[in-house]
Image: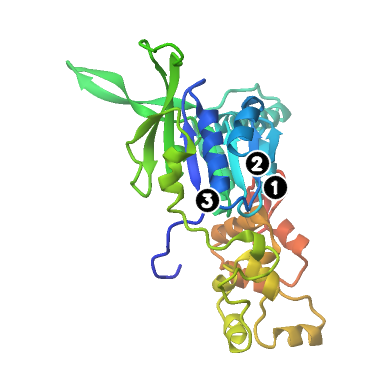
Amino acid sequence: MELMPLAEAPPHLKAGIQGPASSGVTFAAVELACGTWRHFGQTGRLIALDSTGGCRFRREHIARIAPDAEVIVAESASWLDLLRFTELVEPNDVVWIDSISHFTRDLRRAYQADVNETRERKKQAPRDLQFQDWAPIRKRWRETFVAWFHAVPAHVIVCGRIRNVYDTIEKNGREQRVKVGTEMRVEDDFGFEPYLIAELERVRNLQAADGEPPLRHRATVLVDRFDGLRGRSTLDPSFDFFRPHVSKLRPSVPDASRSRGAAPSGEAGPPTGDATSSRSASSPSERGRRTEGEAAAEGPLQHPGEATAAAEQDQPPHLWLDDFDNSQRHAIRTYADHYKLDVGEMLQSWEGEKAELLEKVGFQRGRPYDVQRGRPW
């Protein structure tokens, strides 16, 4: 941990849209995703992971509000497919997942299948999930999807069904359960992680005039970290309703230029001379925070004299976090946290190949990460 000046607003949208079935959640997600894509200059891709088949019914809607967009869709409700999907997301993509509730349900199903498979080998009867099962399920959820949601440098919109929240009160000498609110139907309070949360509901217009729809969808903003939209509501929300939140985001770089290693107009190019020497002497944690554009332009950073020493000793150069994709970095960080190691020092001390390090930390692509599969450092 290190102290640093207060940063600017986050660069990417992290939103949650929740509501009961047929409440307009997919409609609002498409409006927000396409509007965000246009707002930031159409620099990334529009990608959807659809577990309900709802995107197929929004073709004309997307063509009307984003005619230049080519939406890439994957249809699945499998937990493992969700993890594979996260590995395909690239910087500045605009992603919406509809509905996350189906994937968490499959996570519970998969965990129960693993438990009963183990019990079958021991010649024990199968059982349902019990209280002690929720801790490992939620741990797996936090260490995979939730960690990716916060760390991925892309705009992510998560749609989900809602469930009622109850509390116990005492009335007339008796305890009663009363509804106190709603939340997204996911694991471990994920409904409070996004920076922007909107809830959709159906509204009947019993006095609709001719030509007016008798049923409309109302969006109410429950959470806005910028506070500008909190508590506001509108019927049939378009991107203009969410624009005040999106306009306050501050993307660090336009990836269209940085991905090729070029500096955007008005910015200095890669440091040279003394600046390069100063950067190469920086700490491992600072080197791990380079943008992808800097990594492409500068190449792997090295300590002064490191390349010469490696050549003399005929050893491979050190590994850096830039050498790994998002899911691999998460596995390495989780392993380091588990064994209380510094990520930079751990990578510098590793003398083997990249694949051997991933095997050491127990990383297996397409499987929920579990540090127990790794080997102690």
Tell me the kind of residue under disc 3: His
Using the numbered discs, state the Cα–Cα distance from disc 1 to disc 3 in whole angstroms: 16 Å
Contact check, label 1 and label 2, Cβ < 8 Å:
yes
- At 58% from the left edge and 51% from the top edge, which residue is drawn? 154
Tell me the kind of residue under disc 1: Leu
Picture layout, residue 117 above or below residue 156: above
Camera-near label (1 vs 2) is: 2
Across and down, in percent, residue 231 comes to 32, 36
Across and down, in percent, residue 35 comes to 53, 42
Element on which disc 2 rests: strand
Element on which disc 3 rests: helix
Disc sitting over residue 102 in the figure: none
Q: Which residue carries the number 2 mark?
A: 47
Across and down, in percent, residue 323 comes to 70, 65
Query: Would you call the spot at circle 1 few (<14 residues within 10 Å), some (14-19), or many (20 or more)?
Result: few
Q: Which residue carries the number 1 mark?
A: 88
Nearer to me, 344 or 300: 300
Using the numbered discs, state the Cα–Cα distance from disc 2 to disc 3 in whole angstroms: 17 Å
Picture layout, residue 217 above or below residue 62: above
Element on which disc 1 rests: helix
Camera-near label (2 vs 3) is: 2
* Rendering quarter of residue 171: top left
Earlier-in-chain disc, 1 versus 3? 1
Across and down, in percent, residue 265 comes to 59, 70
Q: Which residue carries the number 3 mark?
A: 150
